Image (cartoon, grey):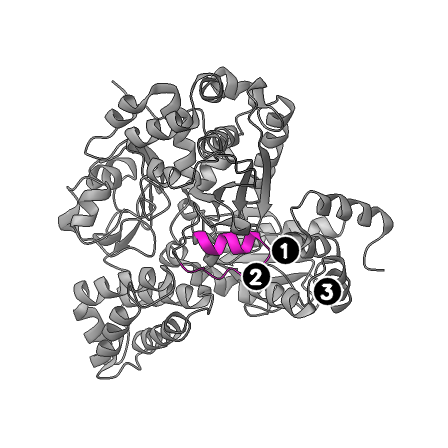
Amino acid sequence: MTTPTPLTAGITPNGPVISLAEYEEMGGYQSLRKALGGMSPSEVIETVKASGLRGRGGAGFPTGLKWSFVPKRNGDTGHRYLVANGDEMEPGTFKDRLLIEGNPHQLIEGVLLAAYAMEADFGYVFIRWAYRDAFLRLRHAAAEAHEAGYWGHDILGSGFNLEFHVHVSAGRYMCGEETALLTSLQGGRANPRTKPPFPPVVGLYGRPSVVQNIETLCNVPHIIANGADWYRELGLTEDAGTKLYGVSGKVKNPGLFELPMGTPIREIIEEHAGGMRDGLKLRAFLPGGASTRFMLPKHLDMPMDFGHVEAAGSRIGTGTMIILDDRTCPVGMLHNMEHFFAQESCGWCTPCREGLPWVEKTLAAIENGDGREGDLEILERHAKMLGPGYTFCALAPGAVDPLASALEHFRDDFETHIRNGKCPY
Amino acid sequence: MVLTPEELALFDHGLSLEENPRSACVAAMKFIQDRRGWVNDEAMEWLSVKLDMPRADLESVATFYSLIFRKPVGRHVILMCDSVSCWIMGCETVADHLRRRLGIDLGQTTPDGLFTWLTIPCLGACDMAPAMMVDEVLCGPLTPELIDKVLDACVAADSL
């Protein structure tokens, strides 16, 4: 039996887009018809809850539960918003681009279903500028869908209304943080907001809003079409569904692979990504983008899912792995990542604004052979003081997660750099 | 005149679709940038009136987003990814080639005004690392030969 690949069915990487006619032929928009024709918003939420779908953007929050936090309308006629987060900029992550470019209608149907569940009347897709092809294809698909009556006034005669907008951003990783994204959508600098209140209660323009990752939303039409049990059974472990895993770095076949949630990490790297390039060994890997902790070869036989990766001290994050080989300098790699985080800090809170550049400078000094006694202690202190609870949002804690694990796993490398006054790689 | 009458009609139509003028500020600056290459002081002043947004607020937004240009850029903008997957795959080596070929460093524009070289975080093309975007086209995995080919094509297109 071949494994079902609902998310990527019909998609060829860097190939043509799936048109409306093709999408409908694949069963597209049938879930929307099903929901609008016979399910209440609460039933949609309950189905998604029962499916076990968890957010694919990094935090892994249960999707149905998030939607249930939106207060019921009860006569409230103000706007409420469903916002699809297409600001994919986590280093090493390239999954949402494939989903938008390959099958934009699947995303639009996911937006519609989520919006219906939370009784929203506005659906936004927030997309980064650099995803140019994705934007053009999505804009075209949105026009097709509007023409066909899938969004707008009184959709399919159900009485449900939804305005659909695509917002093109202008750079900055910070926009991916959900509250910063909302501020950005309102025309401001992308600074995060205090939580609570959380966006489902107070979000865009102070109104109930749900911000959801692209891949997460793309799962929803399949859950509504096939049911919660079907979706749960797709996963090999406790976690449900399929996952768009990615592998980059010096492997033979870097790319994206839709596989059952809980597929062993070794299978993803060695079978699907073709294993390491000749002459190289896998030294460590970041399981889900630059803001996750390093994992080691001893973790390779572990299932790639939320629970197991967390038990190994890391996070599945975006599920797109970055491989560190034995000929690449871990200190140099860390320096590259911390440069990114320091550059992308929005500057709103002091620990992040001041701390990350200090981390970056210290790592640069070590990598360039100017490291000093005591530098590792400075880095360790930052790894703690920029961690959860000390900063406004998750950017800095995400930035120091790989740092803390690198100091633990690659201690010898750091010490050799400092002792010998140069990078040995 | 910041916009021609035809451009203004298009601009006003776009603005009418937004929930409020301020929300449109990024799109509005991009509208001008797409047509003039960058957003100059006169355009900022005009926008601040048009969007009913204090100039300082508009400036703070403009300077926050890395892809709003408040200075002139070359005819072609090269956005080279320097994030971790591209770094592992050797983006520094291909950057050296770009540096030699154009005779400029990151953040600079060639004296003939043809190319501006900027950095960009992860382009979401890690399976084709190292990657870059020239104008609106994504390319990778980069080699010195591919860089030459892409830049030659830009030069050839300009001379048509």
Residue B69 placement, left or right of A349: right
Point out which mark residue B44 bears. 3
Relative to the observer, which residue lies in front, A95 or A202?
A202
Mark toward the start of the polypeptide (1 vs 3) = 1
User: What's the residue at 53%, 45% (across, down)?
Assistant: A126
Which structural element holds mark 1? Answer: helix
Q: Chain letter of disc 1?
A: B
The spot of residue A326 in percent (x, y) is: 23, 58
Q: Quadrant of residue A222?
A: top left
User: What's the residue at 36%, 25% (across, down)?
Assistant: A223
Q: Which residue is mark 2?
A: B65
Tags 2 and 1 both on a single chain: yes
Three-letter code for the amino acid on which mark 3 is drawn: Met
Question: What stretch of residues is rendered in magenta?
Answer: A178-194
- The answer to the question of whether label 2 and label 1 lie on touching residues, with beta carbons closer than 8 A, is yes
Q: Mark 1 and mark 3: span between their CA atoms?
A: 12 Å
